[in-house]
Amino acid sequence: DIQMTQSPSSLSASVGDRVTITCRASQGISYHLAWLQQKPGKAPKSLIYDASSLQSGVPSKFSGSRSGTDFTLTISSLQPEDFATYYCQQYNSYPITFGQGTRLEIK
Amino acid sequence: EAQLVESGGGLVQPGESLTLSCVASGFTFSNCWMSWVRQAPGKGLEWVANIKYDGSEKYYVDSVKGRFTISRDNAENSLYLQMNSLRAEDTAVYYCARSDFNYAAAFGFWGQGLRVTVSA
């Protein structure tokens, strides 16, 4: 199975900050990586697919990139509604696997 | 507007069965791979199973193989998860999710989720 390792596990930031979350795949997954946002008690929301393509309706403050098996999600100009848990997910091979999540909290 | 509405959750005892349903609207269901993803209390997301748009391919996480069956009825725009021999570790919120861009599991849209509790 492909292991997806996110860092950090939690992150404190202030409104207006720019933050970066990293996800490392245990083996090559090409660009088949998605980023999801989940708020407490709510369903996940898909933000990015194919490592760097924004889902429809997702603001451009969210961006993704890839370098080999390392992937990053960058969120610019944090707003209160951005504080949530973020997951990466690979869909290159079965079983489909998720990172353990990064909890983004208000400082 | 796309919608995925799950139903069928609840409290069951270990060893019992339960069937989850997910009704889709607002998009062409028969064109999409569909998945079930679960989240145990306080834990992260776990993919459970997916099914090709025509039902011809199905895949499962190892922990549910032989116990869970994913199926779909494109005429009814419905996705199902038959869960047998339920265990305490199957306790979770279960989400149905639509995959986009002709991928098998690039989730573009999620249902609201439903809770399944397995407890004596």
Image (cartoon, coloured by chain):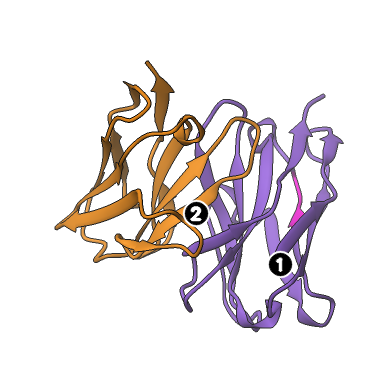
Residue type for callout 1: Glu
Foreground residue, B67 or A25? Answer: A25
Q: Which residue is drawn at the image coordinates 76% and 63% (left, top)?
A: B80
Lateral position of residue A91 relative to residue A42, left or right:
left
Q: Classify B16 as above or below A56.
A: above
- Estimate the x, y position of residue B30 in percent, counting from the top left: 68, 82
Q: Give the range drawn in magenta.
A: B81-85
Instruction: Report the residue that reaches farthest toward the top.
Output: A107
- Please tell me whether residue B112 is drawn above or below residue A103 in the rendered image: below
| Chain (purple) | B
In this view of the protein, which residue sits in the foreground, A70 or A46?
A: A46
> In x, y percent, where is residue A34?
39, 56
Question: Dividing the picture into quarters, in which one does residue B25 lie?
Answer: bottom right
On screen, residue A85 versus residue A2, left or right, reads: right
Name the residue carrying label 2.
A46
Q: Which label number is shown at residue B1?
A: 1
Residue B7 at least partly seen = yes
Does dot 1 land on a helix, a strand or a loop? loop
Could you classify mark 2 by the number of other residues whose Cα lies within 10 Å: few (under 14), some (14-19), or many (20 or more)? many
* Left or right of A106, for residue B32: right
**Residue B81 in sight from this viewpoint:** no
Residue nearest the viewer, comparing A43 with B9: A43
Q: Which chain is orange?
A: A
